[in-house]
Amino acid sequence: QFLIRSDSRNRTEQSRQNRKATSFNMFSSDPFQRVTAGGTFNRTFSIFAERYDLFLTITSLIFVPLASLMVTIQLFMGSSIHTMASLSDGSNYGQSAYASDAMDDKTTANMTKFMIQFTLEYVAFMFIAIAGQAAMAYATAEMYAAREPSWSACLKKGFTRWCDIFGAAFLVGFGMGVCNIFIQLIAVNLLASKTSFLIFLGFLLLVAYYVVIVYVMVSLVILTPVIMVEGTGPIKSIKRCWELSWDNRCYIFCTAFCLSLVYYAFQLVLYLLLSAIGGTEAVFSWWGALVLISPSIIYLPLVVIAETVVYFNIRVQHEGMNNSVLVRELYEETVNSKETKYDLVESQQFV
């Protein structure tokens, strides 16, 4: 028994050493070197393939509330479509006021039930999703630092930074929501006018507003890795994202767009297959909802890894980031208050 336990420990240790060696060679070159857009995708897939067990474990925790949420939405949409079809067919319910009132009461009850269930499931999903994405970003950063991350430690770290990520997202969302109210009010008034010039101005205002939204969203794509690596608060993290993305928005947008395009194209194929096999009932069934969101098991970790790779790529190019700086930012609790963490890059070059 002693020999068996000793041999088991040796195999476990050998496996750890092999995995650690692989993590050093995973990039096929120095990870702190600028890579092209194609190299970004190559590095993203390499990181996922190296620790797919970790990323899929964290993703599965996100997938459970996501699946529950999507099933609820799909079932409600299917029920609503069935109700509308029944109302349009007078032979089923008759033309009496009693039948119409009964249907209205049923629709109201279903809407109330859906809103309560949707709210609870959405809160649960947001709570797990934010921590899960933060955990995967932190795991990617640890792999850059040539460490061996564990899903439990990364998830714990993600929950500790939950408030910072949520706070930053809330500030941005609240600001965009307020702006949206004013822009929509102005645009509606312009479009409702009878003057062609004012209608044209209203259309241009809406187009410009949506361009600004895309501009802001692209600038904040790297928000999660900024918070997880540099440990800054919500406001400083937003400013930091704006600083890093200043000359790199095209690079960020193209990376995010390509991943999203592949994901939604694959989802469209699944939708067409479901429609061809089982029609509308299959699409709006609980199992149809699970089939449609199944690609997210791979898509979610790839997106977070890509965001983190883009973040490091930008810092390597503009700040000369290296392993020593990353290790200090990830694992040192205290930093001189007069010196920001990303200023360590410049000081490190003179050591």
Image (spheres, rainbow, N blue to C red):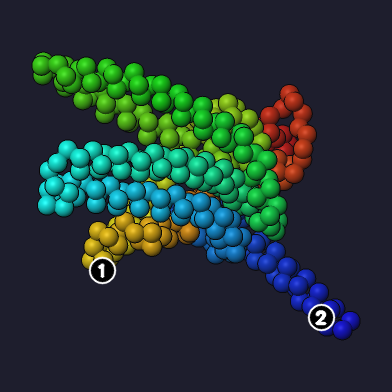
Tag of residue 295? none
Front one among 308 and 68: 68
Residue 73 appears in the rendering: yes
Q: Is residue 131 left or right of residue 323?
A: left
Q: Is residue 144 left or right of residue 290?
A: right
Q: Marks 1 and 2, Cα distance to the nearest angstrom?
A: 53 Å
Dot 1 alpha-carbon crowd within 10 angstroms: few under 14, some 14 to 19, many 20 or more? few
- Judge depth for marks 1 and 2 and give the one in front: 1
> Is disc 1 placed on a helix, strand or loop?
helix
Dot 1 amino acid type: Ile
With respect to residue 209, does 290 lie above or below? below
Circles 1 and 2 in contact, beta carbons < 8 Å: no
Q: Residue at x 41, y 60 (%)?
A: 290
Q: Position of residue 17 (x, y in %)?
A: 74, 68
> Is disc 2 placed on a helix, strand or loop?
helix
Residue behind mark 2: 7
Q: Residue furthest right?
A: 2
Q: Residue at x 28, y 47 (%)?
A: 80
Q: Earlier in the sequence, mark 1 or mark 2?
A: 2
Residue behind mark 1: 277
Q: Position of residue 351 (x, y in %)?
A: 76, 39
Dot 2 alpha-carbon crowd within 10 angstroms: few under 14, some 14 to 19, many 20 or more? few
Picture mark count: 2
Q: Position of residue 219 (x, y in %)?
A: 46, 34
Residue 346 appears in the rendering: no
Q: Position of residue 19 (x, y in %)?
A: 68, 67
Front one among 311 and 65: 65
Q: Quadrant of residue 21?
A: bottom right
Q: Residue at x 51, y 30 (%)?
A: 170
Q: Tell me the quarter of the image containing the N terminus.
A: bottom right
Dot 2 amino acid type: Asp
